[in-house]
Image (cartoon, rainbow, N blue to C red):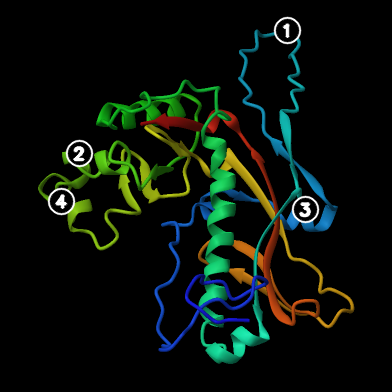
């Protein structure tokens, strides 16, 4: 097989890359800012005990009554509602490196390849869960409109909507980092960014561009994991009970000579497994990074879709 520069594949298509200069340094793959799943309600322990699915009870909002002296009291036997979180998502990233590729590169790119797959897995899970922002929260009217820059009135509108539902604060505001009408517009609002107004460094003078900044009883975070389609962006303001998530670690595979490592990433709250195995057909080392998870809308009235 000829070795040439026509491709950068190291896997099943064969080594078609000539690496004349190798380096231990590499530029990592793009990671979504501010991993958002840590702001959701994690019910993983319950799913771990009860099987593939678990019911998350949503407490009813009960009203008190006045009792007229001598009359019988009226019982309110409301039991609320529940949502089911099911472990039904199996997401993976994988790659293989042939022995020929490993010999030429001296396996110097293996760490880069593994890290990029892990980042791809974490990004994919977060984007999947936050896809709920588009059409899953309808008990509160959506605030603002598509292709419209965020304004302070929009922020207040979201907070008022959640306050009307008696959602405990402070809330979490997740805003699309890659949109001029979303985080780009929020960062330019004077009350949010101006140090003279806030009495503390604003977004323009913050090392993390204002991430984690408390404003209008909401802690704001930019992230690229939110839905963005052309000029339509879906942001989300919510209490953590708005989304319920669950994850479970895989068991170690039996037989086949696979070597595994179970990983919990504390920054994102995601559990995943790295599997190393031998592909005898291609004489290649194969690495699979995969995760098992599920999610559901929790208390729908405690979240507001914020369009921009």
* Disc on the earlier residue, 4 or 2: 2
* Disc on the earlier residue, 1 or 2: 1
Q: Which residue is mark 2?
A: 189
Q: Element under label 1?
A: loop
- Identify the residue shown where x is 61% and y is 20%: 63
Residue drawn 47% across and 49% down?
225
- Which is in the foreground here, disc 2 or disc 3? 2
Question: What label does residue 71 carry, if any?
Answer: 1
Quarter location, residue 287: bottom right
Earlier residue among tags 2 and 3: 3
66 relative to 29 in the view: left or right: right
- Looking at the rendered structure, the secondary structure element under dot 3 is helix
Circle 2 — which element? loop
**Front-most of residues 27 and 152:** 27
Question: Closer to us: mark 3 or mark 1?
Answer: 3
Q: CA distance from mark 2 to mark 3?
A: 42 Å
Say whether marks 3 and 1 touch (CB < 8 Å): no
Q: Which residue is mark 4?
A: 199
Q: Are marks 4 and 2 in contact (CB under 8 Å)?
A: no
Report whether residue 202 is seen.
no
Marks 4 and 1, the one that precedes in the sequence:
1
How busy is the neighbourhood of tag 3: few (under 14 within 10 Å), some, or many (20 plus)? many
Q: CA distance from mark 4 to mark 3?
A: 45 Å
Q: Nearer the viewer, mark 4 or mark 3?
A: 3
| 44 relative to 202 in the view: left or right | right
In the displayed structure, 57 sits above or below 16; it is above
* Separation of marks 4 and 2 at Cα, in angstroms: 15 Å
- For the question of whether residue 206 can be seen, the reply is yes
Mark 3, residue position: 47
Q: Are marks 4 and 3 in contact (CB under 8 Å)?
A: no
Q: Is residue 304 above or below residue 280?
A: above
Task: Please report contact status of discs 1 and 2: CB closer than 8 Å, yes or no.
Answer: no
């Amino acid at each position: 097989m000829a070795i040439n520069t026509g491709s950068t594949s190291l896997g099943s298509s064969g080594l078609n890359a000539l690496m004349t200069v190798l380096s231990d340094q590499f530029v990592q793959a793009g990671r979504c800012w501010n991993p958002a799943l840590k702001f959701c309600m994690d019910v993983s322990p319950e799913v771990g005990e009860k099987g593939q699915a678990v019911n998350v009870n949503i407490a009813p909002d009960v009203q008190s009554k006045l009792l007229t002296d001598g009359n019988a009291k009226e019982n309110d036997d409301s039991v609320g509602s529940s949502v089911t979180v099911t472990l039904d998502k199996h997401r993976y990233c994988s790659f293989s490196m042939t022995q020929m590729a490993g010999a030429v590169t001296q396996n110097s790119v293996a760490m880069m390849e593994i890290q990029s797959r892990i980042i791809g897995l974490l990004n994919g899970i977060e984007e999947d869960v936050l896809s709920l922002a588009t059409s899953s929260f309808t008990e509160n009217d959506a605030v603002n409109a598509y292709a419209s820059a965020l304004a302070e009135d929009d922020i207040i509108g979201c907070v008022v909507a959640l306050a009307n539902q008696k959602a405990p604060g402070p809330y979490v505001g997740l805003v699309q980092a890659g949109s001029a009408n979303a985080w780009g517009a929020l960062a330019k609002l004077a009350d949010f960014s101006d140090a003279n107004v806030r009495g503390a460094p604003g977004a323009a003078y913050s090392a993390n561009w204002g991430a984690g900044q408390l404003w209008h009883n909401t802690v704001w975070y930019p992230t690229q994991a939110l839905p963005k389609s052309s000029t339509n962006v879906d942001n989300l303001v919510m209490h953590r009970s708005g989304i319920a998530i669950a994850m479970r670690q895989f068991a170690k595979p039996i037989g086949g000579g696979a070597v595994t490592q179970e990983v919990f990433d504390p920054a994102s709250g995601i559990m995943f497994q790295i599997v190393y195995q031998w592909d005898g057909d291609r004489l290649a080392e194969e690495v699979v990074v995969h995760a098992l998870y599920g999610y559901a809308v929790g208390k729908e009235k405690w979240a507001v879709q914020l369009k921009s």
